[in-house]
Image (tube, grey):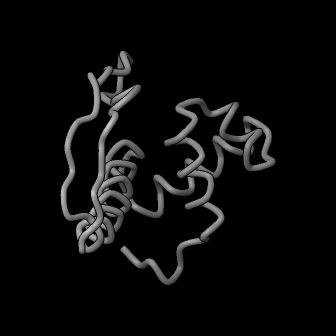
Amino acid sequence: MNLARLDLNLVVALRALLEERNVTRAGQRVGLSQPAMSAALARLRRHFDDDLQCVGRHVARLEAETLLTALARRVGHLELAGEPRRHLNNTLRSWASLPVRIRPTS
């Protein structure tokens, strides 16, 4: 996989898709028609020689790892502040709400 040749506009399209979970809405968000968005996603599939679910998981893991690493440096204590609520979806497992209380490092 050659990341130097990756069109970064395709990463923007993938991120919109991961957040919107709908090709039409993701396309509207980035200013593309549904067919153009589908074509962009097909280009991503070809570039990574893989389906987007796999690529999406890798991107999500990298984003999560980056975020958690930055947070870990600044957070002294983290605890649940309420009842977590699951987001029910046929394809993704996620949280609709995950209330937390954070105390910074001293």
Is 38 above or below relative to 63? above
Name which residue lies at 61% across and 58% down: 12
Q: Nearer the viewer, residue 25 or 50?
A: 25
Q: Position of residue 90 (x, y in %)?
A: 36, 16
Left or right for 57, reference 77: right
Name which residue lies at 56% across and 41% down: 17
Q: Nearer the viewer, residue 40 or 88?
A: 88
Quarter containing the N terminus: bottom left
Q: Position of residue 82 (x, y in %)?
A: 28, 26
Q: Nearer the viewer, residue 2 or 25?
A: 25
Q: Position of residue 24 (x, y in %)?
A: 69, 31
**Res 105 → quadrant:** bottom left
Name which residue lies at 77% across and 39% down: 28
Q: Position of residue 49 (x, y in %)?
A: 38, 58
**As drawn, which residue projects farthest toward the bottom?**
4
**Res 58 → quadrant:** bottom left
Q: Nearer the viewer, residue 60 or 83?
A: 83
Is 63 above or below relative to 85? below
Is 90 above or below relative to 6? above
